[in-house]
Structure formats: structure tokens, C-alpha cells
Amino acid sequence: MAEQHHEDWDPRSAEVQKDQIRAYDAMRKECPVAWSDYQQWTLFRHADVMRALEDHHTFSNAVSAHLSVPNGMDPPEHTPYRKAIEPYFAPEPMARFEPVCRDVARALVQTLDKNKPLDVVNALSRPFALQIQCAFMGWPDSLHQPLAEWVMKNHRATLARDHAAMADVAEEFDGYIRDLLDSRRQPNKPAPDDVTTRLMREQINGQPMTDAELVSLLRNWTVGELATISASISILTNYLAHHHELLNNLKAAPEQLPEAIDEILRMDAPLISNRRVTTREVEIGGRTIPASEKITLLWASANRDEVVFGNPDQFCPRQNAARNLLYGAGIHVCPGAPLARMELRIFMEELLKQIEAIEQADGEQPERAMFPTGGFNYLPLVFR
């Protein structure tokens, strides 16, 4: 079993955490399938990650000990939930939500204090992620602050692998969701016609979802969205602070933003990894992995694989788009990708309308986020 393996690396060592991306680049060459107590088996190469994504019979998503809708499910159980969710991200609902998204982005960008250092994470990326998620789900503004605090507690508990704290923060979030569901069921009070209410009416195999299923679905939806959208905004603004010519090009031709955003986030992952579990013994990358072992798919490495992308730091959006795993691949490809892409595009459009340049703040060092989150915890930049 896992505890008998010899550790190939320590994902939580100071050396790795100092620069996760460079550490993963090195591991991809030195030990592309590696075992550690923290991540168990980690796949670093694009081809190995693609193999796991395309063979969901061998590399199962049913990793969590808790109900996880639909992320932690395999077909056939996964299929009806996926079919229920996908229409929420179809072109028509995305077009309806776009003006709301633009209003949120514009209002936030207009509060920017220019020509002095500010922390992008606190001023822009976290507030945008929270406000846009609540707007999409139909949740009240009064949830912004509790959710902001919850995100921080969840991240600290996850990083520490503190299972008691993780259970506590999960229960706290579930309480918020149950309150939202209960408020929509009050007699003599019509429920708002929003995404949350519509999800409550969805049928899975001819039956309404249970509250446990709804809470799990909404938790997975929200946690993923808050973390990745916030990380993405910090990564994008940081990249443009170091690439002034690209910023000017995108200001002049904002129609190039979608492919530029995907490419920047290929190089610097907002979501570091996902997990799978083996259903049988499998050989991959010259290693034999027993059945029932946890697998970490390291997006932050696979999306920088030199075999696929050449120089991983070279900005080549059109050349790299087809094999970019930013939103995954296979049957578990991110259903919310159209929403995330629209939110990021609109935010960057509104930001670039309001500014002329982004610069590093003199004398202040950014602080990168820690696994399993990408992006930054603190990012001091100056907007001109």
C-alpha cells in the first residue's frame, strides 16, 4: 500500500513551495511519475495526464469519501448530473448573464486607486470572484463577506490537511446553502427565478435532487469558481505587468483577449491539480501503480510539457490552444468553462479600458499562493 513506497519528492518542501512551477518543470524531467506521502502518485507529463483523463474506467473520479456531485462520480452515475448541469452554461444563458457580469466588472474596476501600489488580490481578484459567483447563482450581497472569510478558512484547513477543520468549514458552507434552499421554500413567498431555484427543480433519473446532492453540487461549483477566478485575475494582471507590449496589443485589439487569457493561464496555472484513484493495477511512465491508489494530475506541469509546447514560457496562443488542459479534457472537462472564460474576458476588457499600464510596485515582493491553489496570496501592483 501507499505507506510502503519510498518518497520521490516532497511537494510541501520549502524549495518546492518557493516556486512551484519551476519545481514541477524539474520533476517532469527527473521523475515524471513520482510518489509522495502528500500527493501519492503525481503525473507530471502531458501524455500521462491525458491518458488518465481519457481512461476514466482505470482512473476513477470517485476519490472523495464524501458525496461529491458531480466531480467525484463516474458513469453511469455521473451522466445524468452532468446532463442537468450543462444547459446552465449554454450560449443563451451566457448571453443573458453577460450584461450583469459587465456591470460587476466595471463597477469594481472603477474603484481602482491608480498610481499607487495596491494588492490586486484584495482589491480586485477576490472581490470579483465573490461578487460574480453570487450574481450568477442569485445569492444576496450579504453573503460576500461570510464567503470571503470562508474561502480563507477553507484554504488554511486544506493546506494543513487538518481534517477536523476541513469538516468544520464544510459544515459552515453547507449551512449557508441550506439557508438559501430553505428561504426559497417558504410558503407565500415566491422563490426568485435564478440558477439556484432552477437547480432545485432539476430531476435526476426522474427524481428531484436531495438536499445533500444540492448542497454538494453548489459547494463544488462555488469553491471551484471562487478559487480559480480569483487566482486567474491575479495571474493575468501579474503577467501583463511584466509584458507591456502584450498589454498594449490587447488594449488595441481586445478581440484577442480570449486566446491570450487561455495561454497565460496555461503557463501559470490557476488550478494546480485534480485527483483520481486507480481501479486496477496500471503501468504508467515506467512505474507500476497498484489498484486503489490516489493519483494527482498536475495541470501546472502537464500544461508546460516541452514535448507538447516547446518552450513552456513562450506565448503562442494559437499554436498551443488545441492541447491546452486549462479546463481539463475527457468526460470530466469543466462544464463551467464557458462561464469562466466569459467572466475573465469581460473583467480584462473593462480593466484595459480604464488603465494605460500595469507596473510592479517598487520594493514590495508578491507572495505566491500555496498548493493546491495557484496564483497569488498577495500581489502589489501599480495601475496607471
Image (cartoon, helix red, strand yellow):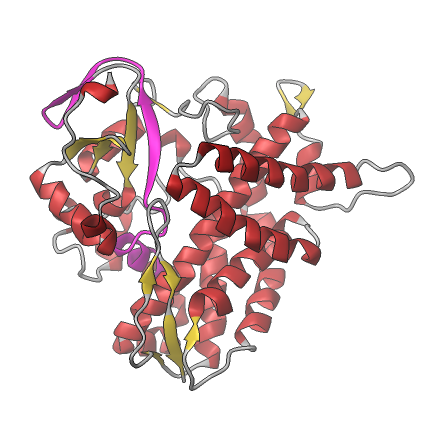
Apparent side of residue 376 relative to residue 83 in the rendered image (left or right): left
Quadrant showing the N terminus: top left
Q: Residue at x 47, y 78 (%)?
A: 353
Q: Position of residue 278 (x, y in %)?
A: 29, 19
Q: Residue at x 35, y 60 (%)?
A: 261
Q: 174 or 78: nearer the eye?
A: 174
Q: Residue at x 24, y 34 (%)?
A: 49
Apparent side of residue 39 relative to residue 308 in the rendered image (left or right): right
135 w.r.t. 69: above or below: below
Apparent side of residue 100 relative to residue 115 in the rendered image (left or right): right
Q: Is residue 256 visible?
A: no
Q: Is residue 350 visible?
A: yes
Which picture quadrant has residue 210? top right
Apparent side of residue 251 relative to residue 264 in the rendered image (left or right): right
- Residues in magenta? 261-289
- Residue 141 part of the magenta-drawn span: no
Q: 25 or 73: nearer the eye?
A: 25
